[in-house]
Amino acid sequence: MNAVVQDPAASIEQKLFVTVPAVTFPDGSIESSFQVATYLTSKGEDGAATISASTAPWVKINYHDAVAAAAGAGLALITERQYLALAIDIASVAVNWTGGAVHEGNLKQGLRNGDFDEAQAGDVVPDDADEDRWFTLSNGERICDVAGNAYSWVFDNVQGDEKGLIKDEFQADSLSIAAAPFPSMKRGMGWRPSAGDGWSGNALIRGGYWLDGGVAGVFLLGYAHPRDSYGDVGFRCTKPA
């Protein structure tokens, strides 16, 4: 009898949200546990935001429309503190490191090496194991595309204004740039800005996309104009507390 091997992605396809445990940041502040979508947000047949393993991420949507689409579905755009909590939790789990132990080798960076030319649905499995899209949380739950495939718009509640847009330059102790365990572009961290960089009026994006190579990572931090839409930028939703 031939063994039946189930694709790991298929085994959790119906689990549309995972729970991120509470995280204590380097500054001592705590981000409470929250629920986040397993997959990047898709656009349903009715035009509303939906979470699906089999539908490609909803890209070509600007920041403001992403915020509205999430709210329209009874959800919320992931915040900067939440994305950082998610990244820190991922970095605390040995299986997410290529060396098999925490801080050994590189932190996994997802779908990023140019084998595709557009964002892929969550059930697509890349040929290269180095592009494994799944990240394991400290509670054993798994989440797709925290790095790679498509960027996520992020509501900035660290140095942002009431709309979640960047309003101040990055301070040296800003969690946005100080929370990662290794420097920018080292050990799978992806790229992030330096203290003093000013992106005022722009919106944060995180994670990276299918062609980012070493730039991608769960700690990658970039920016984009909030009123523009991009083929490589989507969004991830959370459940309101």
Image (cartoon, rainbow, N blue to C red):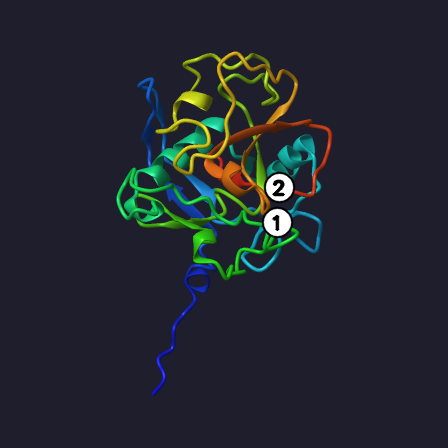
Q: Position of residue 185 (x, y in %)?
A: 46, 32
Of 42 and 175, the residue lying toward us: 175
Q: Position of residue 3 (x, y in %)?
A: 35, 80
Q: Is residue 182 left or right of residue 156?
A: left
Q: Are marks 2 and 1 in contact (CB under 8 Å)?
A: yes
Q: Position of residue 73 (x, y in %)?
A: 60, 43
Q: Quadrant of the C terminus?
A: top left
Q: Position of residue 103 (x, y in %)?
A: 30, 37
Q: In percent of the image, x 61 and y 49: which residue is there?
A: 57
Residue 232 vertical placement versus 161 (above, below): below
Q: In percent of the image, x 68 and y 27: which residue is there?
A: 226
User: For residue 234, which numbered disc appears in the image?
Assistant: 2
Residue that carries the numbered disc 1 in the rendered image: 57
Q: In percent of the image, x 61 and y 21: which residue is there?
A: 165
Mark 1: secondary structure: loop
Find residue 167 and report its image quarter: top right
- The three-letter amino acid code for the residue at tag 1 is Pro
